Amino acid sequence: MDSASTSSSGNRLFGDTKTENTSKQTTENAGLVISAGDKKPSRTKAKGSRIAANLTTDQLARKRAADRNAQQSMRQRTRDHIHDLEARFKELKRQQALLEVAEKRTGKLETELEELKEELGKLRRESGL
C-alpha cells in the first residue's frame, strides 16, 4: 500500500476496494465511517483453499504432498490427452489416404463408365437399335 491510500492511522481509505473478512470492520475517511459490508466485495478465494502461513508443519507437508500429487496427476492426464490426440490424428491421416485412393478410383471408374456409355450409344446408332 502506498502513502496515498492510507490515512495517518494506517486505516484503508474510502477508495480502496479490498475488504476484510469481518463485516463489522470499518474504515474512516474524513470523519465518514463506512462498514466493510457496504463496499464492493473483492475476489473470493477458491472453496477449500488454505493459506500456508496458517498451517502447522504437518498440515503444510500434507498440503504440499497433495498439491504435488494433484499436479502430477494433471500432467499425466495432459500427456494421455496429447497421446490420444496424436493417435486420432494418425488414424485420420490413414483414413484420408484411403479416401484419396477411393476417390481416385471412383473418378477413373466414372470416366470409364462415360466412355462405355458413349461407345454403347455409338454402337446402337450404327446398328439402328
Image: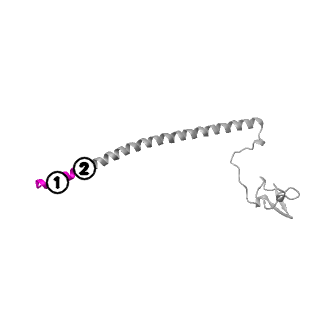
Q: Nearer the viewer, residue 52 or 82?
A: 82
Q: Is residue 69 left or right of residue 54?
A: left
Residue 90 rendering spot, x and y as whole percentages: 46, 40
Residue 26 rendering spot, x and y as whole percentages: 82, 58
Judged from the image, the secondary structure of the residue bearing numbered disc 1 is helix
* Residue bearing mark 2: 113
* Residue 119 painted magenta: yes
Question: Which amino acid lies under the numbered mark 2 shown in the image of this protein?
Answer: Leu
Residue 16 rendering spot, x and y as whole percentages: 78, 59
Q: Is residue 42 above or below residue 68?
A: below
Distance, label 2 to label 1, CA atoms, is 14 Å
Magenta stretch, main secondary structure class: helix
Q: Is residue 72 left or right of residue 94?
A: right
Question: Which amino acid lies under the numbered mark 1 shown in the image of this protein?
Answer: Lys
* Residue 127 painted magenta: yes
Mark closer to the chain start, 2 or 1: 2
* Residue bearing mark 1: 122
Mark count: 2
Judged from the image, the secondary structure of the residue bearing numbered disc 2 is helix
Front tag of 2 and 1: 1
State the quadrant of the C terminus: bottom left
The part of the image, by quadrant, that contains residue 35 is bottom right
The reply to whether discs 2 and 1 touch (Cβ–Cβ < 8 Å) is no
What segment is highlighted magenta in the picture?
A: 114-129
Q: Residue at x 23, y 51 (%)?
A: 115
Q: Residue at x 25, y 48 (%)?
A: 112
The part of the image, by quadrant, that contains residue 3 is bottom right
Q: Is residue 96 above or below residue 4?
A: above
Q: Is residue 120 above or below residue 82?
A: below
